[in-house]
Image: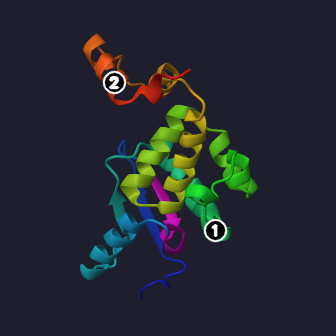
C-alpha cells in the first residue's frame, strides 16, 4: 500500500554516501528531485526512493535539507530584483530564519550552497545565496573580489586587456 504523498519519505544520498531523509512535501522546491521522483514512480516498484546527488557533499546537503525543511513550514518571501532591490542584505531578507541561515555561513559554504541550489534547481535557495554573494562583493576592489571568489591572478597581458575593456573594475 502506497503512503500518502504528504508522509512519503525521500532519501537523498550525498556524494560521500551519507543519506538524508525528507518528506516528499519538503522536497517540492527542487525541480531535480521532483523529476527524479517522477521517473522513479514510473518504475512502479514500492522500494524507497534513494536519489544519488553526486555533486553535493554531506556537509552541504545537510544545510540544503535544513533549508528545505524550514521552507516547507515557512516559505521564504520572494527576493526583489533589479531596481526594487534594497540597499542592504537585511532590507531584502525580512524573515529571521533565512537571514540567520545564510549570514552564519562562511563564504566557502555560501558558494557550495549556491552550487547545490543550482544543481538541485531550488530557486529560493539560489536567490538567497546569490543575494548574499552580491552584497558581499559590493564596494570591493577588483583584488578583493578576486580573493573572495578565489580567482587566479591575471597575467600582465590579461590585466592590461581587462583595464582597457573594463576600466570601471579598477576604479578606487
On the image, which quarter does residue 67 sit in?
bottom right
Camera-side residue: 119 or 50?
Answer: 119
View extreme (top): residue: 156
View extreme (bottom): residue: 1
Camera-side residue: 79 or 59?
Answer: 79
Against 127, residue 46 (above or below) is: below
On the image, which quarter does residue 76 sit in?
bottom right
Give the image location of residue 78, x and y in percent: 61, 65
Give the residues in magenta: 19-28
Dot 1 falls on a residue whose secondary structure is: loop
Whether 163 is among the magenta residues is no
> In front of the other: label 2 or label 1?
2
Q: Residue at x 56, y 58 (%)?
A: 81
Residue 136 is tagged as none
The residue singled out by tag 1 in the image is 75
Left or right, 22 with reference to 45: right
Q: Residue at x 34, y 79 (%)?
A: 46
Left or right, 139 with reference to 40: right
The residue singled out by tag 2 in the image is 164
Amino acid at each position: 500500500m502506497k503512503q500518502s504523498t504528504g508522509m512519503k519519505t525521500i532519501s537523498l544520498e550525498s556524494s560521500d554516501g551519507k543519506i538524508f531523509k525528507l518528506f516528499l512535501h519538503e522536497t517540492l522546491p527542487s525541480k531535480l528531485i521532483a523529476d527524479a521522483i517522477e521517473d522513479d514512480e514510473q518504475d512502479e516498484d514500492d522500494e524507497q526512493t534513494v536519489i544519488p546527488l553526486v555533486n553535493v557533499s554531506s556537509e552541504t546537503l545537510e544545510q540544503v535539507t535544513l533549508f528545505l525543511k524550514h521552507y516547507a513550514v515557512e516559505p521564504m518571501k520572494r527576493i526583489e530584483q533589479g531596481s526594487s532591490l534594497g540597499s542592504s542584505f537585511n532590507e531584502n531578507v525580512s524573515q529571521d530564519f533565512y537571514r540567520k541561515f545564510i549570514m552564519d555561513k562562511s563564504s566557502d559554504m555560501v558558494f557550495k550552497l549556491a552550487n547545490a541550489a543550482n544543481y538541485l534547481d531550488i530557486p529560493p535557495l539560489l536567490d538567497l545565496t546569490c543575494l548574499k554573494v552580491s552584497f558581499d562583493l559590493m564596494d570591493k576592489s577588483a583584488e578583493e573580489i578576486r580573493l573572495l571568489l578565489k580567482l587566479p591572478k591575471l597575467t600582465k597581458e590579461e590585466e592590461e586587456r581587462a583595464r582597457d575593456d573594463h576600466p570601471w573594475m579598477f576604479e578606487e
